[in-house]
Amino acid sequence: MSHRLVYKILGYLSILIGFAAALSIYKIQFAFYGIALGLLGFIVSGINIFLNMKYYSDEEKYPKGYIGMLLSSLPVLFMLFVIMKNRH
């Protein structure tokens, strides 16, 4: 499998996982799944960003992994907000 194919697949996969993780904050019952998907999204996005920096940084300025990382961080930030709000 070529580097370019892995790079493109991981880019779209990171957005898909990040979107699923972001949808999990809709109900608090899905928070555990959202955190797990967020962790998986961080890993996939990190690999996509690494491949961009190593091979394709001059072709594509902003890889799709950045969008996936942003979406994957939403459940973590939501849980942080809920914990801090209930603390006071």
Image (tube, rainbow, N blue to C red):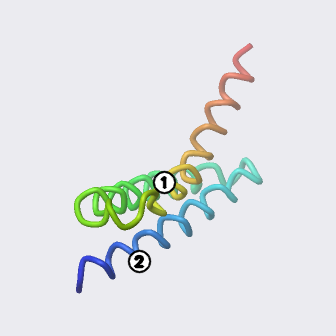
CA distance separating discs 2 and 1: 14 Å
For the C terminus, the image quarter is top right
Left or right for 45, reference 30? left
**x and y, in percent, of residue 76 in the image:** 57, 41
Residue plotted at (48% across, 63% down): 64
**x and y, in percent, of residue 72 in the image:** 54, 52
Residue plotted at (54% across, 65% down): 15
Q: Which residue was labeled with disc 1?
A: 66
Residue plotted at (57% across, 56% down): 33
Q: Residues within 10 Å of mark 2 (few under 14, many from 20)?
A: few
Q: Which residue was labeled with disc 2?
A: 9
Q: Secondary structure at mark 1?
A: helix
Q: Residues within 10 Å of mark 1 (few under 14, many from 20)?
A: some
Which residue extends farthest top?
Answer: 88
Q: Nearer the viewer, residue 56 or 70?
A: 56
Going from N to C along the chain, the mark reached first, 2 or 1, is 2
Q: Amino acid at mark 1?
A: Tyr
Left or right for 75, reference 27? left
Question: In which quadrant of the rendered view does residue 34 lie?
Answer: bottom right
